[in-house]
Amino acid sequence: MRHVVELSKSERTGPSERPGVPWRLIGPTVLVPNLLNSLGQSATITAVPLAASALTRSFAIAALVAALITLGQLASTLPAGWVVDRFSERTAMVGSTAVTAVGGLLAYIGSSIPLLGLGAALIGAGVSVFAMARHAWITVTVPVPVRGRTLSAVAGFTRLGNFLGPFLAAAAFHVSGRSEAAFLVVVGTSVGLLVLVAIARFPESTTPTGDHGRQGVLGTLWNSRRTLFQLGLTVSVISSMRTGRRVLVPLIGVSLGWDNVSTALLLGVTGALDFAVCYLGGSLVDRVGRIHVAVGTLVAFGLSHLAAAVALVAPASDVVYIAAVAVMSTANGISGGLVPTIGSDLADPNAPATFLSSWRLVTDAGGSVAPIAVAAFAGALGLGSACLAMALTASVAAGLLPRYARRHLRTRHPQP
């Protein structure tokens, strides 16, 4: 659906001007809601395994219940596209936030694993639909030349929420003495999000075109299968690098003899670096080009994982390890909004959600599989082999990406 958006004078573009990011529009409709959403999600990720282990005293069951958050997200990705396409971005945001709140309440009052698991799955589903609505909203309202900066700003707010959420969960643990209390953080952020979305000014959409939504989600998935299989799977390697490093980096630190405090400190410092370069990455995506940044990111991920493998056997292992993690974090920050930006470029601006749901399913699946693959490689062949496998995967994707981009990415982006 197309939206008519009135931009301020500074946000309009003339023949020789670049449009600006419409901050006054996306602030209350996207950025602040996204911060609240990520605060609740990260608090949930902290609380679910702790609450499950308290109920069962089984780490295996706790891990399984925690995985239901991700499963809920993946299972609702395609339906989320239908919801947004059938109704509206605002309605989808409100509905998904209500589902998240219900999930948080179930997880809080649940005294059994089934109720806790259902609550976790509902939270994951609500987060997925909200993310889909947010992505579609940006696609139809933000000009293409500043789309990368906008989505990188969204990624930055997500990182901020992910950083602060566990602290809110810890405060809830401390005050109540119960692990389930962290789910009240999810309920609270959901209520705040509902109020904010309800009062924010969303421009009215125009009447849908005659062929609006005609293909539907499944039809779009089928008709876009070559784009998704070739370009989508290749780009998903960026998501795989992000999630895989969450497993590798702490394990390498343990292997090198680092204590928990030192490893956590390194992750905190490099996490700040990740956040600091996020908007810079969006500027590069808009000014230099999507694919140039994507290839550079994959090369950086490949080299940093290769360096991580070297750190396991090098004499100056600590220095190499720190450098490798710093490069990984920089690449992660630079590419913060890259994957959704490419998805927005490929989507039909009249009905973006039908394609974006398929795009998000493919690219998120890569990120979901990576930790499992890393664990399998590390268990069978050792950490060094896992690092080399990640480096090889990034290198292959960097080689394939330009060809697939020329074939499928039709949008031309203004150059400086």
Image: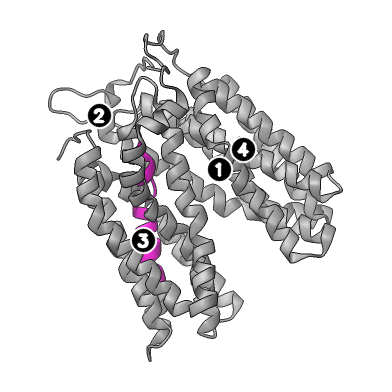
**What residue would you read off at disc 1?**
74
User: Is any part of residue 265 visible from this angle?
Assistant: no
Sequence order check, earlier mark of 4 and 1: 1
**What residue would you read off at disc 2?**
19
Are dots 3 and 4 in contact, CB under 8 Å? no
Sequence order check, earlier mark of 3 and 2: 2
Q: Residue at x 29, y 26 (%)?
A: 11
Sequence order check, earlier mark of 3 and 4: 4
User: Is any part of residue 42 visible from this angle?
Assistant: yes
Nearest-to-viewer mark from 3 and 4: 4
Are dots 3 and 2 in contact, CB under 8 Å? no
**Residues at marks 1 and 2, CA–CA distance in whole angstroms:** 35 Å
Sequence order check, earlier mark of 1 and 3: 1
Q: Amino acid at mark 2?
A: Pro
Q: Quadrant of residue 286?
A: top left
Q: Amino acid at mark 1?
A: Leu
Q: Measuring from the top left, give residue 113's x and y in whole percent.
A: 81, 50
Nearest-to-viewer mark from 1 and 3: 1
Please tell me which residue lies in front, 105 or 114: 114
Q: Secondary structure at mark 4?
A: helix
The residue stretch that appears in magenta: 325-343
**Residues at marks 1 and 3, CA–CA distance in whole angstroms:** 27 Å
Residue 177 on the magenta segment: no
**What residue would you read off at disc 3?**
330
Q: Residues within 10 Å of mark 3 (few under 14, many from 20)?
A: many
Q: Secondary structure at mark 2?
A: loop
User: For the view shown, which residue lies furthest in the bottom direction?
Assistant: 315
Q: Report the quarter where the C terminus lies.
A: top left
Q: Quadrant of residue 6?
A: top left
